Amino acid sequence: MKSNLKDFALNRKVCFPMGDQAEESVACILSWKPDYLYGYASLLLEAAALVDKQSLRFMPPKCVICTAETIMPAQKEYLTAVFKAPVVEEYGATEFDIVAFECGTGHRHFVNPWLVVRESYGSLLVSDVSRKSTSFINYDIGDSGMIKDSECTVIGGTHYLAALEGRTIHRFAYIDPETRFHSVDLGYAMNEYQCMENEVFSFRIIQSEFGAIDLYISSVPSNGPVSLQQFIQNSIREKTGRDIVVNVFVGEKSVELAEKSYFVQRIRETASGVVLT
């Protein structure tokens, strides 16, 4: 209900371009004739692939906005060709909302006047000068990047984000080589479980083989690891209609200590399919 009310207030509709109803979902959104398409780069590419494959007819939007994940120039060109609209990147953070936005000439300008963004040894640090009670000073977002100056003043100031690393587009979990889902569904399931049980613990998820994930948690859930295991498995089954094995490890640290994301994918996509790394 809350999500529906929010979508109504913002005059938006939500599309899920994966699963059995993916084509219908994408077609429904395009029939709405949206002015803008906004979402994760990986999911926009999934939607574009469906539009391309099924030759869906639609009125082109004014702009396609990619957020949260890195997208390559070739992938942006593909989105532009399929949706017949310019594609721009938005860079934001949960703590600060929008930080940078790409102009028509390709510069990711810092557009929030209340944010001071600087680079320190390759890491991006952000300070919010508008928060008097809970100000963030030199807050490490967790991404690495490079800040440069230009003569471009299309939007924001002349400083822009010239390079960005940290979050990548490889954020899919695989049930088999042909069936995959976005790892954010795992994050949502973990969040829902902790809210339902009124408890909080840190976690990390690693996938090294098809049809199974390793879930590392910092402490034992109040109802035991099996309850968490079954909850995640049921949640993914509801999303995909397929089963995935969840192996729960309590109190064990995963070897991916340098990884900032909660999800680590060891299965790498290639042009010819999927291979293990």
Image: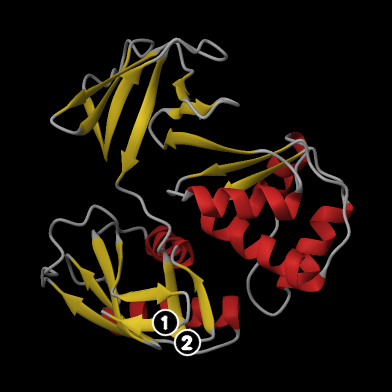
Q: Residue at x 38, y 32 (%)?
A: 95
261 to 252, vertically: above or below: above
Q: Which residue is mark 1?
A: 274
| Res 86 quadrant in image | top right
Query: Which kind of residue does numbered mark 2 sit on?
Result: Pro
Residue 264 appearing in the image: yes
Between marks 1 and 2 in the image, the one whose residue lies nearer the viewer: 1
Q: Residue at x 60, y 85 (%)?
A: 241
| Res 216 quadrant in image | bottom left
97 to 64, vertically: above or below: above
264 to 274, vertically: above or below: above
Query: Which kind of residue does numbered mark 1 sit on?
Result: Val
Label 1, secondary structure: give it. strand
Residue 199, x across and y down, in percent: 31, 59
Q: Which residue is mark 2?
A: 177
Q: Residues within 10 Å of mark 1 (few under 14, many from 20)?
A: some
241 sits left or right of 184 in the view: right
Badge 1 vs badge 2, beta-carbon distance below 8 Å: yes
Most foreground residue, 170 or 17: 170
Label 2, secondary structure: give it. loop
Mark closest to the chain's N terminus, 1 or 2: 2
Give the spatial CA distance, label 1 vs label 2: 6 Å
Of the 4 image quadrants, the one containing the C terminus is: bottom left
